[in-house]
Amino acid sequence: SATYENITVRREGRVGVITLDRPEALNALNLALGAEVVAAAEEMDADRGIGAIVLTGSERAFAAGADIKEMASRGYADVALEDFFSTWDRFAALRTPTIAAVSGYALGGGCEVAMMCDLLIAAESAKFGQPEITLGTIPGIGGSQRLTRAIGKAKAMDLVLTGRMMDVTEAERSGLVSRVVPTAELLDVAMETAAKIASMSLPAAYAAKEAVAEAFETTLAAGVRFERRTFHATFALADRAEGMAAFVEKRRPDFKHA
Ligand code: CO8
């Protein structure tokens, strides 16, 4: 597979791992890094041998935002015509379950990318914020929307209007993160969780992810209908028959991802 300059990529069993690796800029998300993450993630997404993707950074920073030095000299026409940062929509559109393993700073675009992931596992050292207002701009890859859905208007307005950082205690209390773990255990917990998800039936995991994601896009009644039909559809899976037979026979299921 491809070689990358701003990330490292590895695979452990059925888990794909993408590590942001621009330490000199605290993993600031420049366009090259974004293109690499999306290319690596889409390659994993297309691989039936991968059932979960972990996205992580360094101990000091998950990512300290979009690359301010790269944005500084652009004008409105530049960012509008190139639809600046829309590449990341492709990361949000992945079908494979994704886990952000966050240590240190997750600011601006870093917080926004972490929020695109299905699970957000945070180290005790994690710090979240949308500091764009301090630069005279606003969140640009979904922060105003995903943060508000995750933690509500009161907290989202506080963060987006003041630019302040939120520590992990406040982030967990607010509902932003799935789990908080000691910093030294972050990657182990993320990998164990990813391996567990990846051990499930892949088409069932796709359906589960899609159903939960639908809750953010639709009304309750339409969402429940969507869920019901998707639930019915899982009865066409060999894995569904196997999963239920294994329960009845008191053995572990042998999912074939079919
Ligand atoms: N962009 C570029 N470089 C960065 C960034 C960044 N976001 N963050 C840190 N760096 C660089 C620093 O410039 C520094 O480089 P150098 O050594 O060459 O000067 C290096 O990383 C280390 O950073 P610091 O020396 O500042 O480290 P500290 O420990 O003192 O501070 C902080 C860490 C608090 C994280 C600090 O670096 C900081 O405040 N960073 C900026 C955070 C920020 O404002 N992020 C939001 C960016 S805007 C954004 O994300 C918008 C997303 C949507 C865009 C969509 C556009 C359409």
Image: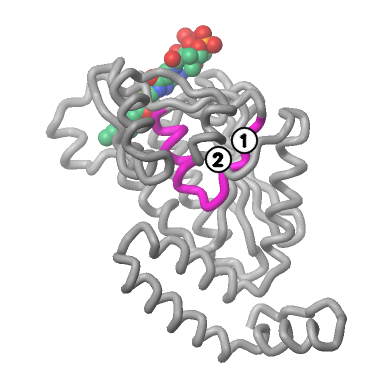
Q: Is residue 3 visible?
A: no
Of mark 1 and mark 2, the one earlier in the sequence is 1
Three-letter residue code for mark 1: Ala
Q: Is residue 119 visible?
A: yes
Q: Which residue corresponds to the image point at 83% horizontal and 77% vertical from the top-left?
A: 252
Q: Which residue corresponds to the image point at 33% horizontal and 40% vertical from the top-left?
A: 141
Identify the coloring: one colour
Secondary structure beneath dot 2 equals: loop
Residue 169 falls left or right of residue 93: right
Residue to which mark 2 is pinned: 177
Residue to which mark 1 is pinned: 122
Residue 128 falls left or right of residue 67: right
Residue 86, image x, y percentages: 31, 46
Magenta-colored span:
108-123
Cβ of disc 2 within 8 Å of ligand 1? no
Contact flag, marks 1 and 2 (Cβ < 8 Å): yes
Residue 232, image x, y percentages: 50, 87
The image quadrant where one finds the C terminus is: bottom right
